Image (cartoon, grey):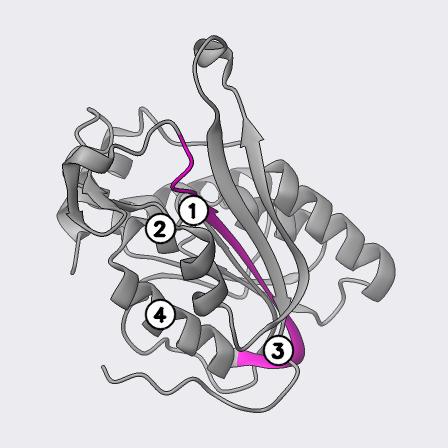
Amino acid sequence: MNQKPEWENFFSRNTATEWYPSEPVIRLLCSYKKTKGAENVKILDLGCGNGRHVWLAAQEGFQVYGIDLSDSAIKLARDWLNREGLKVKDLRSGDITTKLPYSDNFFDLVISYGVLDHMLLSDSKRVVAEISRILKIGGLMFLKLESNTSFTFDPGNQINKNEIILDKIAEKGMIQHFFDKDEVAALVSDFVAVQSYRDDYRRFDNLNKNYQSRWIFIGQKNEDRHIIIGR
C-alpha cells in the first residue's frame, strides 16, 4: 500500500519532523564505532526521513546510505548535509516495500527507526526479507516498532489486526501498525537477537496518562539465507 502522498505532505509541511537523533540509535552507533570502528563500515538508514540518523552516522565517519519514500524528505536531508559539509555515499527516494536497489550482502548495519510500523504487516515482512538479503553475514539490523501496549493504540478503530489509520493533523491518513510481541518475534525470526526489549515511557505532555510503548530490536544475520516472500 503506497502512501507517498501522505508522506510528501508530512515532509513538505516540515512542521512535525524530528531533527535530533534517537537515543537508541546514538547508543548503537557509538558502541559499534568503539568496538568495530567506522572506516569502511556501510550503513543504510531505511526510511531515513529528513536525515537525522544519516547526519549522525556521517558525522561519526561511517559510509552512509539513505532511502525514503518522500522526495521532500530527501531534499531536507540533502540540504542539511550540505549545510554541515557532510558527505554520504548515496541518498535517494524510493519505495522500500519493493526490491531495494542494493546488492546482496552489501551492508554492515541497516537501521529502520519507526518505519516498518507505518505500513501493512505484509509489507513489513517483505522489507525484512530485503534487509536480510542486503546485509552481510554478521551484519546487524536495528528496528524500532510501535507496540500495541501504547496508549495511542485504539482497538476500536482497527482496519486490520493491530492496524489503524491515524487522524492526527501531522500524520492524517497514514497507516500505523502496533506490533504485539508475537508479531515482532515472527517478523525477526531469521535474526539472532542481540538486544530485544520494550521501551515504555511517558511524554512530557502526557505525564498523567498511560505509557507510550515501542519495541527495540537489534538482530544479527548469522547465515547466508534469505527470507523468500512473494512480491
Tell me if mark 3 has few (under 14), some (14-19) or many (20+) residues whose alpha carbon lies within 10 angstroms of its own: many
Q: Which residue is mark 4?
A: 125
N-term mark: 3 or 4: 4
Q: Is residue 203 visible?
A: yes
Q: Residue at x 47, y 53 (%)?
A: 181
Q: Amino acid at mark 2?
A: Asp
Position of 164 relative to 17 (above/below):
below
Tell me if mark 1 has few (under 14), some (14-19) or many (20+) residues whose alpha carbon lies within 10 angstroms of its own: some
Q: Main secondary structure of the magenta part?
A: strand
Q: Amino acid at mark 1?
A: Gly
Position of 141 relative to 26 (above/below):
below
Compare residues 214 and 65 and report the one nearer the observer: 214
N-term mark: 3 or 1: 1
x then y, percent, for residue 107? 58, 75
Q: What element does badge 1 sit on?
A: loop
Asked if the residue at tag 1 contacts the one at tag 2, i.e. Cβ–Cβ closer than 8 Å, the answer is yes
Position of 121 relative to 9 (above/below):
below
Q: Which residues are magenta?
A: 135-150
Q: What element does badge 3 sit on?
A: loop
Compare residues 168 and 146 and report the one nearer the observer: 146
Asked if the residue at tag 4 contacts the one at tag 3, i.e. Cβ–Cβ closer than 8 Å, the answer is no
How far apart marks 2 and 4 lie (CA) works out to 11 Å
How far apart marks 4 and 1 lie (CA) works out to 15 Å
Q: Amino acid at mark 3?
A: Lys
Q: Which residue is mark 2?
A: 117
x then y, percent, for residue 36? 82, 66
Q: Which residue is mark 3?
A: 221
Q: Which residue is mark 1?
A: 114
